[in-house]
Image (cartoon, rainbow, N blue to C red):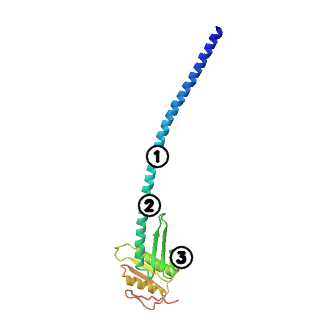
Amino acid sequence: MDSALQIMEQRVSGLRARMDALRADERLFQRAAGLRTQLEKDRAAVLELASALEAEKKTLDDLRNKKAAAMQATATAIAEKMGQVLPLGRAEFRVDDEGAVFLGWEIPGHGVVPCGGLSGGQRVMFESALAYALAPQGQKNPLILIEGAELGQEIGLLLESVATSNVDTQIIACTCHELASISDGWTAAHVVEAAR
């Protein structure tokens, strides 16, 4: 009987151990179920955040496109106003989607020349046109001073272009070159300094 009792005690002890193991497994399953529920909640939150992110990216792209369109409209207006003064060709002013700016002059026979690649005389004419385009509109008696030492007889082209377009800006052009003729609308003043 002793052995039967020992066997029974061993079985009871084994059943208790098994029950403890099952309870531990049950707790693990409960935790896993809680984790699964939390995982599902987290997945739903990630999907919502991804959707919100895509909406914000679209809004940002729309704003970037609007900004680029506004910048290009301004650049086009400046280039057109420069064209009123340039004696030939046309100004080119572009702003790309990343905000990079290109400013150049399309010169017949030379193609588009970036502003930095213009010769000294070309630069004087181009910068004069740019100054005119950037002058405040509606300002009484705006003034642009052109230092035309870099220009030889080409200054006559610039003066003629300005006179033809009848710009509403006072322009003073200085040069050390004697001009063969002066366009209508310009007054020539000769300043001679005696060498000492």
Q: Residues within 10 Å of mark 2 (few under 14, many from 20)?
A: some
Secondary structure at badge 3 equals helix
Q: Earlier in the sequence, mark 3 or mark 1?
A: 1
Residue at 45% across, 55% down:
57
Q: Viewer-nearest of labels 2 and 3?
A: 2
Q: Is residue 75 shown to the viewer in this render?
A: yes
Name the kind of residue labelled 3 in the image.
Answer: Gly
Q: Viewer-nearest of labels 1 and 2?
A: 1
Residue at 46% across, 78% down:
126
Q: Residue furthest right?
A: 3
Q: Position of residue 6 (x, y in %)?
A: 64, 12
Q: Position of residue 43 (x, y in %)?
A: 48, 42
Name the kind of residue labelled 1 in the image.
Answer: Leu
Secondary structure at badge 1 equals helix
Secondary structure at badge 2 equals helix
Which residue is labeled 1 in the image? Answer: 47
How far is disc 3 from disc 1 in space, using C-alphas? 52 Å
The quarter holding residue 128 reads bottom left
How far is disc 1 from disc 2 in space, using C-alphas? 25 Å
Viewer-side residue, 80 vs 124: 80
Name the kind of residue labelled 2 in the image.
Answer: Arg
Which residue is labeled 3 in the image? Answer: 117
Q: Which mark is residue 62?
A: none
Q: Earlier in the sequence, mark 2 or mark 3?
A: 2
- Considering the image in quadrants, where does the N terminus appear? top right
Which residue is labeled 2 in the image? Answer: 64
**Quick check: 38 above or below 188?**
above
Residue at 50% across, 39% down:
39
Q: Residues within 10 Å of mark 3 (few under 14, many from 20)?
A: few
Q: Residue furthest bottom?
A: 180
**In the picture provided, is 186 more to the left or to the right than 109?**
left
